Image (cartoon, rainbow, N blue to C red):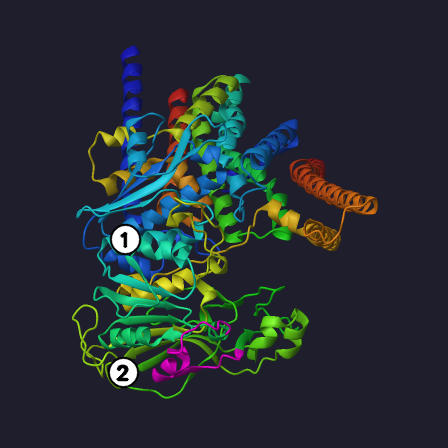
Amino acid sequence: MQIKNMLKKLLLILVLCLLFILFISVMSSTSLIFGSKKADLTQTHKYSISPQSLNIAKNLPNPINVTLYISEDLGNEYPELGIHNQYLQRLLNKYQAASNGKISINIKDPLPYSATEYEAKSENIRAFPDTGNTKNLYFGAVFNNSNGEKYTIPYFSVQRQNYTEYDISRILAKLSGYNQNKIGVISFADNISNWQIFKKIKTDYPIEHLSKQSISIPQDIKTLIVYAPQKMDNKLIYAIDQFVLRGGNLILMIDPYAEKIAAKYPYTKNNNINFIPWLKHYGMDMDENKIIGKSIDKSGEYLTFLNNQNQQNIYFDIKDINLPNHMGKALKISMQTAGELNLLSKKDATYTEVLSITEGGGSIDSKIVKFGTKEKISSNFEPDNKKHILAYLIEGNFTSFFSENIYGNITHPDIIPAFLLNSIKPAKIFVISDSDFITDKAWNGVLYLKGSTVYDQIPTNNNADLLLSVIDYMNNNLALSSLHINYLQTEDYSATAQISNTIYKENKDIFLQKWKEINALQKEFIKFQEEYNSQKTTMSLSKIQDYDEYNRKLFKLKEELKALNYKFQQEILQKIHFIIILNSIIFPSILLLCLLIMLKIYRHYKIKKYKRELYE
Amino acid sequence: MRQLYALIQKENLIFFSGWGLLLLGASYIVLSMFLNFFIGGFFVLDNKNLYSYFSFQNVVFILIIPAITMRSWAEERKFGTIEFLLTQPISLAKLVMAKYLSCCSSVAFLLFLSFPLWIYCNVYYQTDNLNIISSYIGCFLMGAAFCAIGSAISAICTSSAIAYISTSTILFILSFMDFSKILYNLKLQQATYSRLQNSLNLDYHFYDFITGQISFDNFAYFILLSCLGIWLTIRILEYKKG
């Protein structure tokens, strides 16, 4: 009997082991078959990668190894990074599934003072402290291929979450090989080399900043950016003209105000010319007295212009953008004081409208925009329902702007090459009627300090992506220029943000009133101080009293603002407490009570029924 | 079928008529909401899919579900009613299924308690409802699998307390077991290794539901786990009966 029991127990254990093995094998096979075919149930299709990204993953020429450095405590310490981690890993799985085994993913946990932590540091993965500041956490990745090329994302920022797919796809496309031609930049504004956009371009293409007095464009430069030209030197125009005829690509960012500002400077040389005739040579014209606007609704409020008080942007969404081969799903471009490009006559080249306003567009006098008030701008602007084009892409062969070599017969193979009257190679020219669309404030949410990487940039608009796409296209890097930008959201949808927005809206007027009073008083105070410093006013007892009075008033107003702010914070806290109590206690209690009452009624009814049945 | 329905009704009436319902419901909601509001970051996260709530459901279920399943068989044995039950003209499979489905309905009831939060968020904030539905399905399937495992353990144990502790421990191991160390020694290809590691990880399947990334293997995992638990319960009871 005992042996029988023992045998029974053994059999049960054996069956259990077999079942466990069966479970593992069934799960492994279902996961291997179906694991990569996942349905994306999210509203924004956050986890779905675009056809362009899929294409990049499918056509990888070399195997790519992705090493993720993710601390295990990441999600516990920072829940938002935990969510981002879930998203990142699932996104990478999609790439892996599409790559037919060419992408391998290796996840490493850099424990404090371990060899993995030193490895992460040597790979430039950024360390950041946990909430208790006791140890370092890591959340970055290294992508490398068999050729030894390597790209690092030092830190997957939550703010840059919308760009994760874009960043990964771009790295994969770069690891697959691309034309890394040199970009030349000629700027008529100062210090543009420090701008974030050039930091972004620099990660993909080498950049050389050229002087606006250049007489030739170096041979190794394949694409030239000319920023905000004004009163261009004849020699520079000649150099660019010859560069284009040799097949060089040109990106021209012109500004309606540029020439007017330049005209104010009396020391401008006589041989410098307005760029408009040069532009006309390429079959285009821009009216410098016109600024293009776009109405956002029928109420007459226009999101468009720049003046001293109101710096408003004009926004283009995807229906306004037509960049060849560019498949950006939700590109958002912002511009200020853009001019209108008019096509004069089509030459031997093909002209593509890249940016245009088709709905709600209109124009307004540039003087009103520059010096008028917001009300004046609004009253003067009327949408004309015409198409307004703000950027063109011209591709083809051109003729020279000059009839002969401006240097006579002097030629030098490197500095002044032989004069060309016609194109020897087709070129691409991109003309955009706004220059300040690449300034940091137009597209970048955060200005970072020295030493920050391109992954620290938090784009608020896709201005930089548009320019980069144009550069990619000009350099025939079509896999890069067609990258999908999954622009999900820029707003903060957290509960606290939404609560504070609601409360702020209720108190907006009081806040603004207080700020206005403070600003007015501060202005008066500054004026008073300036007068005193310039010794227009001598110090007297009444002046000292005035000075004290200003200080007292300012202090009082600031205190009132602080009190208002405190009240505001308290209201948010109260609302948060209310939500917690409502959802943790009140609602569930009501639900439980209702259920209990219903059950009582049901039981009562059932007992009654049984009693009746028994009686019968 | 009618027998099964009557049995489920009986089990449900026992559960829902006592103070157990109130106590369990209250514990579940207090624990879930505490984790949601104070640890999960409900107020600071972009919480369109109620991630802060659902991401802790595995932990909450490890603590709550053993309390539901512990009484299914252990209590019958404790009060000596199991012999009476097993001699009834009902098949053992039906009995086990009835108790299992009754536990599942308790899980559904617990999840139902969080509906006001969903409705509240729908009214005042932006929500991703399809993703939330997927999370509810994931929670229910995980809860059902936990019930099946709990039921099997309850069939082995004679005391409810032991059943509770054992179930919690096993569910904890199952949820947080790291297969990577076992699989690492097998020297598999990187892609196969990560796929295998994920396929055996309960957490990974659960998070697939929460993130709205569901596929057949996620359903298969929880359904298989439930079937395994039910089958084991039947075998254990048959063994004990013998």
Q: Which residue is mark 1?
A: A172
Q: Chain of mark 1?
A: A
Q: Nearer the viewer, residue A596 or A535?
A: A535
Which secondary structure lies at badge 2? loop
Query: Where residue A482 appears, x then y in whole percent?
Result: 33, 64
> Which chain is mark 2 on?
A
Instruction: Using residue B177 as the reference point, say whether residue A610 is left or right of it.
Output: right
Whether residue B234 appears in this view of the structure is no
Pointer 2 residue: A400
Q: State the quadrant of the C terminus of chain A.
A: top right
**Vertical arrangement, residue A447 with respect to residue A469, above or below:** above
Q: Quadrant location of residue A412? A: bottom left
Q: Is residue A289 magenta?
A: yes
> In the current view of this chain or complex, which residue is farthest to the right?
A542
The residues colored magenta run: A264-290
Q: Residue A167: x percent and y percent? A: 35, 52
Disc 2 and disc 1: Cα gap in Å?
Answer: 40 Å
Q: Earlier in the sequence, mark 2 or mark 1?
A: 1
Q: Judge by depth and name the residue closer to the eye, A260 or A557.
A: A260
Residue name at image x 53 percent, y 76 percent: A291
Give left or right: position of A61 versus A534. Answer: left
